[in-house]
Image (spheres, rainbow, N blue to C red):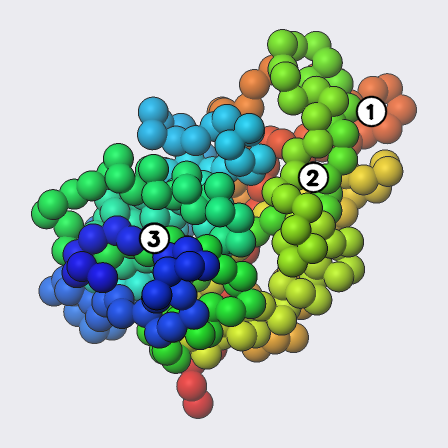
Amino acid sequence: MEQFTSHIIRENSPEYNTTLSIGYIRTCSCAKTHINCITPKEWLKSQLGVWQFYYESRDVRDKKKHPATFPISLCKRIIELFTHQGELVLDPFVGSGTTLVAATDLDRNAVGFDLQPHYIDLCEKRLCEQANLFNKSRRVAIQDDARNISNYLKPNMVSLIWTSPPYANLLNRVRKNKSRRFRDNDQLGKIEQYSQDPRDLGTLSIEKYTVEMGDIFESLLPLLKPKGHCVINVPDMWWENKRITIHVSLIEELRKRGYELRNIIIWDRTNIVNQIGIFGWPSNYITMGVTFEYLLDFWRPPEK
């Protein structure tokens, strides 16, 4: 592989299932005790527990391309907060490749994994559009199962794990909500699913999903540097008139697997959500899940 380039590894690539050659040592001049390169003013803004972001022209918002995307600006905030230039970011469920795009902007090394070849194709397209001759870091998208990531990376290489994983099988159902009925939305009546691959976490019940997520993140913990952060973006959802608290399930499971919860940040999406229909009125109060999501910030506890 050429150094300082973006690269795609597929199942038929010679680099498939082999140790990856990628940088992970900081290249900035920050003090060793600093966890990032941001200014005090930027730090102060990030201390707020509720964040808002806007989409830009490079963002993927078409649900036909991917059922659950997030803005580049959100991704950049997370990466800037928990890494230095030159360090390595890992996205175990890279999807549309937004993490890799943000890492390009910030001169971070990054590697993303996804089972589905069409998502890797989308990553490749976006990375080609993001070519930066002055950027000395590398981005790699790999078509493989998140369960196999330890075959590619060595212990203590990763400074940040950042991802928005599948939401169990909760998207794998016909969309019927009222907010889609009262506007021109071609997603009404559609099934927004990641795939029907049995290896895909998006096909599992919430109970099986939680255990599988625990297994995956337990295997990733040794790759993370001590005091390295792991940030997971998840919503809660309604299913058969019950709130499914994905964020609670993941917090409990990752704590059992050796992670320590540091922060819970609310991603306030009210500024980017389109017309909202009335839910539950007048007899059943329901908060709109599309208006906020959770950013669960864990770290690998420091060695004693």
Q: Classify the position of the C terminus by image quarter.
A: bottom left
Report which residue position mark 1 lands on: 280
Q: Are marks 1 and 3 in contact (CB under 8 Å)?
A: no
Q: Is residue 103 above or below residue 63?
A: below
Q: Say few, some or many: other residues with alpha carbon within 10 Å of mark 2 (under 14 / 14 to 19 / 20 or more).
A: some
Report which residue position mark 2 lands on: 171
Q: Nearer the viewer, residue 199 or 294?
A: 199
Residue 170 position within the rendered picture, expressed as x and y whole percent measured from the top left: 73, 43
Residue 139 position within the rendered picture, expressed as x and y whole percent measured from the top left: 29, 54
Q: Which marked residue is nearer to the observer: mark 2 or mark 3?
A: 3
Kindly identify the amino acid type of the residue bearing the numbered disc 2. Answer: Leu
Q: Is residue 225 left or right of residue 187?
A: left
Pointer 1 or 3: first along the chain: 3
Residue 44 position within the rendered picture, expressed as x and y whole percent measured from the top left: 33, 48
Which secondary structure lies at badge 1?
loop
Q: Is residue 123 above or below residue 18?
A: above
Which residue does the image show at 57% across and 74% down from the upper left? 218
Kindly identify the amino acid type of the residue bearing the numbered disc 1. Answer: Gly
Question: How far apart in space, not on screen, are marks 2 and 3 (Cα)?
Answer: 28 Å
Report which residue position mark 3 lands on: 8
Q: Are marks 2 and 1 in contact (CB under 8 Å)?
A: no
